[in-house]
Image: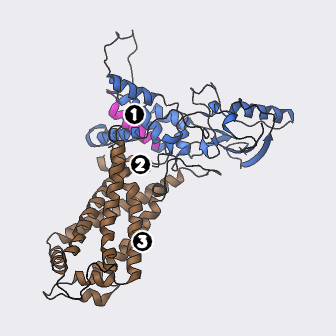
Chain colours: A blue, B brown
Amino acid sequence: MKVTLHIWRQAGPASPGRFETYPVADLSPDMSFLEMLDVLNETLVARGEEPIAFDSDCREGICGACSLVIDGIPHGPVPETTTCQLYLRHFADGAEITVEPFRARAFPVIRDLVVDRGALDRVLQAGGYASVNTGSAPDANTHLVAKEDAETALDAAACLGCGACVAACPNASAMLFVAAKITHFSLLPQGQPERIHRAIALVEAMDREGFGACSNNYECGAVCPEGIPVRFIARLNRDYLRAALTSREFTEAPGTRAHVE
Amino acid sequence: MSRLVRLFGTSIGRKLMTALSGLLLVTFLAGHALGNLTLFQGREALNAYADWLQGHPLLWLFRIGLLLLFTVHVTLAARLALENREARPAGYRRRQLREAGYASRTMILSGGLVLAFLAFHLLHITIGVVEPEAFRAVDPSGRADVYGRVIHAFGQPWLVLLYLAGLALLGLHLRHAIGSLFQTLGFNHESYETLLCLFSGLLALIIVAAFAAIPLAVAAGWVGGVPGGAG
């Protein structure tokens, strides 16, 4: 099969970008979208042109490295799928496909289709973890977790951190990402000591990075490769409201508390 | 540092305040719509109700409270919208939306138009600059003839259309607003997600239908048919 690609090319963070058109022929419908880009890059290199830069790592849908907005949808038209698990059989022969980078102020373009998603890492560093003591592992079953809570926490923990939620949101908001982290830890006993701090720290870090605010368009949940539900955002709002109303930390200057005392 | 200052300093805090002021405004709208339905009890009932409201000792406190709510709601929403726009300086060439509906994407537009409609409504019904003669009319008991004012207003097709258009915009705004405020205030759960969505849509519809019943009923001649009648 053959397709025509309209791909965003940008030499560097400060360079102006533009769309370039690339017809690609002799493709197998069983190639993944990324393999097609590999094939295209080989021909570009053979012609002495710069290959198209794009992110990928595991190529089996579990790492969250791949990105791309394909025909206006982050990770492409197949629901609950990462770009690496998108195959050419999902497109019509002769299709015209537009490929753009994830767009957000917090995700500056580094080159072509590669954006810097470090903002999500910095949000996590602000409090998206549960501190544990070093030493020998605790005995099994010392922390009991209700089955339902464990399942919901794991649903949230499935977040790959790919940033598709940000790319899809009309406001480039990272609320679904932060909500997944909050839900993951808030439902588990290990997450309780830092629960309040986490809510405050993650929300303020999210704002610092320049993400927008949620206006409940719910595009994020529709494109999430892990199908993380938008109702988790209500839990984030709930935890944050609780922190604002009841915690002493909320009355202190931001950043004065780094961890649980 | 005060809790409120810090809360206003974050996006979620501003959203919470927008939602909370919105919730109170929806409560006001529901009360206003219910009060308006007094019209269907006739001239005497509506004018007595309006007279009671006008003479209420807490009237100005209520009005200042409403003004404050509108100010908080509008300024925070406008600020959030600007911040949201800034969060994506370069847009997409192609965009396919899957969940976002017309209502959710046009909240600032529908909100702004509802605000303009509200300004007109206040000038028309509360301050009386649109139809000064009708505004000065009094009923046999010497009270302001609010009933007569409404009948007179909605005897004119352009005012009926204008009010229906304003209410349609309000409905569009409320359709997304009511569901959203629950989510923003932290109420959403797997077990009642569908019910909440249904309830939000239904409440928006009921409020708008209650308001729209008046211009429609007057225009159709179902009320106020007998001039100066018992009503």
Q: State left or right for residue A149 relative to residue A115.
A: left
Q: Is residue B6 visible?
A: no
Q: Do the residues marked 1 and 2 share a common chain? A: no
Measured as percent of width and height from the top left, residue A7 is found at 72, 44
Q: Amino acid at mark 3?
A: Ala
**Percent position (x, y) of residue A87?**
67, 33
Where are the magenta residues, as a range?
Answer: A192-206
Which residue occupies the foreground of this view, B211 or A74?
B211
**Position of A180 relative to A168 (above/below):** above
Nearer to us in this view, A30 or B80: A30
How would you classify the magenta stretch by its main secondary structure? helix
Q: Which residue is mark 3?
A: B165
Q: Chain of mark 2?
A: B
Per the image, is A202 magenta?
yes
Can you say whether B203 is above or below A7 in the image?
A: below
Q: Residue furthest bottom?
A: B133
The C terminus of chain A - image quarter: top left
Residue B176 in the image: state x and y as whole percent: 40, 55
Residue that numbered label 2 is attached to: B11
Q: Amino acid at mark 2?
A: Ser
The residue at the point 50 percent across, 45 percent down is A219
Amino acid of disc 1: Ile
Spatial CA span between label 1 and label 2: 16 Å
* Relative to B106, residue B114 above or below: below
Residue at figure coordinates x 27%, y 65% from the top left: B66
The residue that disc 1 covers is A182
Quick one: SS at disc 1?
Answer: helix
Q: CA distance from mark 3 to mark 1?
A: 42 Å
* Residue A207 part of the magenta segment: no
Say which of A193 and A249 sits in front.
A193
- Left or right of A222: which side holds A140? left
